[in-house]
Each structure stands twice: as C-alpha cells, then as structure tokens.
C-alpha cells in the first residue's frame, strides 16, 4: 500500500468508533519468532514469492491448521495491492482516490495494531472486495469494508463517488481491525487484531474466529457455522491463488 498515512480521527470520534472492551486479551506485538503462522510483526518475513500476473493456478483447499501456508510462501504486500486496487476501481460506485485511501488506511491501521498488513488486506478483499460501498451482507447485518455487524458504522453511501472522507474510510478499517463493543457480540466485535492475539498469531485460526466468532476446531478450520472455506480462502489470497476481488469457495462443504 502507498506509504501515505491517513488523517487520524479525532480522539472523541475514535473513542466512539472503537471503544475496544478492556477485557479483550491484549494483542501481543512482542513476538519476534519465526513461527510459520505468526503474524504479529509485519517485518518478520517479507514476501519473496514472485507476484503472479494472472491467476493461472488452481486454488488449494487448506483445510487443516497445519496446512496454512507459512509467511515465506506469501506474496508481497505490493502484489496484493496491485491486484486488489485494479478490482477496487472497476466499479462505477468507487473512485481511484477512495481506493488509494482504503489502501493507505489498511496499511496504517494494521501497522498501528502490529499485524501483518497482508492479512488485513486479504480479509478486506474477502469481505467486501475492498469497495467502500459494498452490498450489506449477512441478511442486512454486516456493513463496510470489513463487513462488521454494527448498525451505524460509518459508511460512504451518503457521499458522491470518489469523495468519501478519509475519516469515514479509516473508521471502517479500524472497526475491522480493532473491533468494537456493544450490548451484543457479533462475530467481528473483537476485531482482527484481537483474534490474532487470542490465537497466538496463528493466522488460520484467527481468521476462522473473525468470520464466525469462535474457533470450534483449532485443527480443522472448515468446522464452523460461517463460510466454511473462509480460512482456506484467505490462505489462497496470501499465496496468490486468489487475486484481487476473485471469490470462490476453496474447500468443499465437508
């Protein structure tokens, strides 16, 4: 993502948007080991895999936690961005400046949270194709770039194309990465950073939890009530098996 950091929200708005519960486990950014699924330090293992120009391969089913590809097999952040941005601006509902602001916001917030921006970017592509005006999902319950189940999350639908404020885009990204609190606990309430911390940096288990609100089987990542191939879909995005806004269920419905 471009090395341009977004304008920050005011402290009052930030508090109202995030309001991360104090009883959430603290996200540990001190881990510096090379555990193959650890993703708490964006600089641990840079992307060294050649960036595919097209998706010519066949996506794999990464069903089990031990199957989840190590960071050394992930494509670079630049590669994820190049394919993602191309799809983000293909819709007449989104503009190039908005796409660039989304990219900047994800990179900035992920860095502040101490997580690998590739994971955040892959989850965002999975949830909304990176579009600032996505269709409301989950039968009208999920909103924004990270499809957070929070009525009232800042949206871009009230703004002309390519004029959604950076503060609104950043708030959507913060809701997905940091999470939010409320009277109920929808799956994404804790946020992606929470799940990575709670799962010790294990990306497969973390994204499983983000999608469904729990990790029913820490070994078989398809055992869940949400999108059963979700963790595998994210894995394919990280290794280049799914590019940009391409979607498919990469595991059968076991």
Image (cartoon, rainbow, N blue to C red):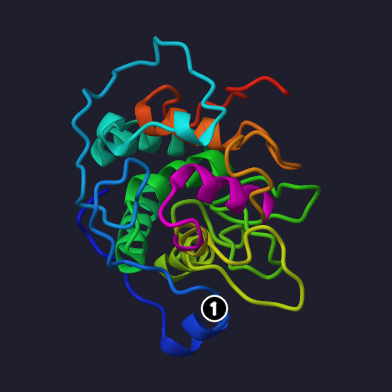
Depicted 118 relative to depicted 158: above or below: above
In front: 181, or 167? Answer: 181
Count neighbours of disc 1 (C-alpha within 10 A) and say few if under 14, some if 14 to 19, many if 20 or more: some
Q: Is residue 245 magenta?
A: no
Please identify the quadrant where the C terminus is shown. top right
Q: How many numbered marks have been drawn onto this rendered protein structure?
A: 1
Residue 94: tell me if it is visible. Answer: no
Give me the residue at 54% from left, 52% from top: 145
User: In the image, is 242 to the left or to the right of 82?
Assistant: right
Residue 226 position, x and y percent, is 72, 42
Q: Position of residue 89 (x, y in %)?
A: 43, 38
Q: Is residue 6 left or right of residue 21?
A: left
Q: Residue at x 32, y 40 (%)?
A: 36
Magenta span: predominant SS is helix
Please state which of residues 197 and 170 is positioned toward the viewer in this rendering: 197
Left or right placement of residue 198 versus residue 218 in this view: left
Is residue 236 in view from this perspective? Answer: yes
Relative image position of residue 236 (x, y in whole percent): 45, 27
Tell me the residue that label 1 is attached to: 20
Numbered range of the magenta stretch: 197-213
Which quadrant of the view contains residue 74?
top left
Outermost residue toward the bottom?
12
Q: Does 138 appear above or below 101?
A: above
Q: Position of residue 3 (x, y in %)?
A: 20, 56
- Residue 211 lies within the magenta run: yes
- Position above or below: 50 against 28: above
Q: Residue visible at 36% across and 28% down? A: 239
Place residue 80 in its image quadrant: top left
User: Looking at the image, which residue is at 40% across and 16% down?
Assistant: 55
Q: Secondary structure at mark 1?
A: loop
In the displayed orientation, state which residue is furthest to the right: 139
């Amino acid at each position: 993502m471009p090395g341009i950091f977004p304008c920050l929200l005011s402290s009052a708005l930030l508090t109202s948007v995030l309001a991360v519960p104090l009883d959430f486990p603290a996200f540990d950014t001190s881990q510096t080991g090379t555990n193959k699924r650890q993703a708490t330090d964006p600089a641990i293992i840079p992307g060294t895999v050649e960036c595919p120009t097209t998706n010519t391969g066949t996506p794999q089913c990464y069903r089990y936690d031990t199957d989840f590809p190590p960071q050394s097999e992930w494509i670079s952040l630049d590669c994820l961005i190049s394919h993602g941005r191309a799809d983000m601006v293909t819709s007449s509902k989104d503009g190039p400046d908005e796409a660039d602001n989304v990219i900047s916001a994800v990179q900035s917030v992920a860095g502040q949270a101490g997580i690998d921006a590739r994971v955040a970017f892959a989850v965002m592509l999975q949830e909304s194709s990176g579009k600032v005006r996505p269709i409301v999902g989950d039968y009208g319950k999920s909103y924004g770039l990270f499809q957070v189940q929070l009525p009232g999350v800042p949206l871009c639908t009230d703004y002309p194309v390519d004029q959604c404020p950076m503060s609104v885009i950043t708030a959507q990204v913060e809701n997905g990465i940091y999470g939010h609190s409320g009277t109920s606990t929808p799956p994404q309430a804790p946020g992606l950073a929470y799940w990575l911390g709670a799962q010790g940096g294990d990306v497969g288990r973390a994204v499983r939890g983000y999608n469904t609100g729990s990790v029913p089987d820490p070994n078989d990542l398809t055992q869940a009530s949400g999108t059963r191939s979700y963790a595998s879909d994210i894995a394919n995005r990280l290794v280049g098996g799914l590019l940009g806004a391409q979607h498919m269920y990469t595991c059968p419905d076991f």
